[in-house]
Amino acid sequence: MSIDQQSDSRIRVMLAKPTHDCHDRGVRLVARKMRDAGFEVIFCDFLVPSEIITNVVEEDVDVLGVSCSSGGHMPIFEDLVAAFKDLKLDDLFLIGGGVIPEDDVTELKEMGIKAVFGPGTSPEDAIEMIKQEFAA
């Protein structure tokens, strides 16, 4: 397999830090670990949901990870899920992370968020979940 073919088959992940949530140390670590695992990672910070949606479409990503650590995560995820349904991006693998209360995690999963990774979660857990999803 040529180098070009290898890079074309890499899983494309966008990690987004919405609005003015400056708690980005964890998501930056996850981005580095995902790159080390062979994923193509696009990192976007301080975006409103409409900008995240535009970037997802333009970058044609397989996975979107949204990290929220300062509250306000529910309307952000609601906007994203609604937009992806409207755009018929049902195959987008959407995960969350950051400081999100357990009650909200349950609701997010009901909305279609595949997983929410909280503080202390190993980046390898997210990497393994994504690899399993795209192994087929």
Image (spheres, rainbow, N blue to C red):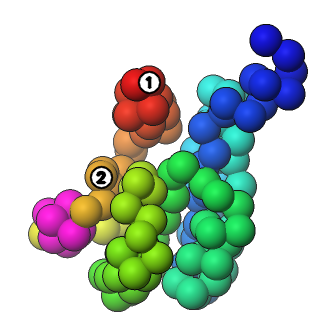
Report the Cα–Cα distance between label 1 and label 2.
Answer: 16 Å
Q: Which residue is mark 1?
A: 135
| Residue stretch in magenta | 104-111
Q: Residue at x 61, y 67 (%)?
A: 56
Label 1: element kind: loop
Q: Residue at x 69, y 47 (%)?
A: 41
Residue 112, located in which quarter of the rendered image? bottom left
Q: How many marks?
A: 2
Q: Which mark is residue 114?
A: 2
Task: Please report contact status of discs 1 and 2: CB closer than 8 Å, yes or no.
Answer: no
Q: Is residue 109 found inside the magenta-colored segment of the image?
A: yes
Q: Is residue 78 found inside the magenta-colored segment of the image?
A: no
Identify residue type, mark 1: Ala
Instruction: Report the quarter where the C terminus lies.
Output: top left
Image vertical order of residue 109 relative to residue 52, above or below: above
Q: Residue at x 45, y 32 (%)?
A: 134
Image vertical order of residue 58 relative to residue 34, above or below: below
Task: List x then y, in percent, for residue 104.
Answer: 20, 71
Mark earlier in primary sequence (1, 2): 2
Image vertical order of residue 41 relative to residue 113, above or below: above
Task: List x then y, in percent, for residue 60.
Answer: 64, 58
Is residue 35 shown to the viewer in this render? Answer: no
Label 2: element kind: loop
Residue extending furthest toward the front: 88
Relative horizontal placement of residue 4, taking residue 76 as reference (left or right): right
Residue in front for this viewpoint, 33 or 50: 50
Residue in front for this viewpoint, 120 or 131: 131
Residue 102, located in which quarter of the rendered image? bottom left
Task: List x then y, in percent, for residue 57.
Answer: 62, 69
Badge 2: few (under 14), some or many (20 or more) residues near its Cα, within 10 Å? some
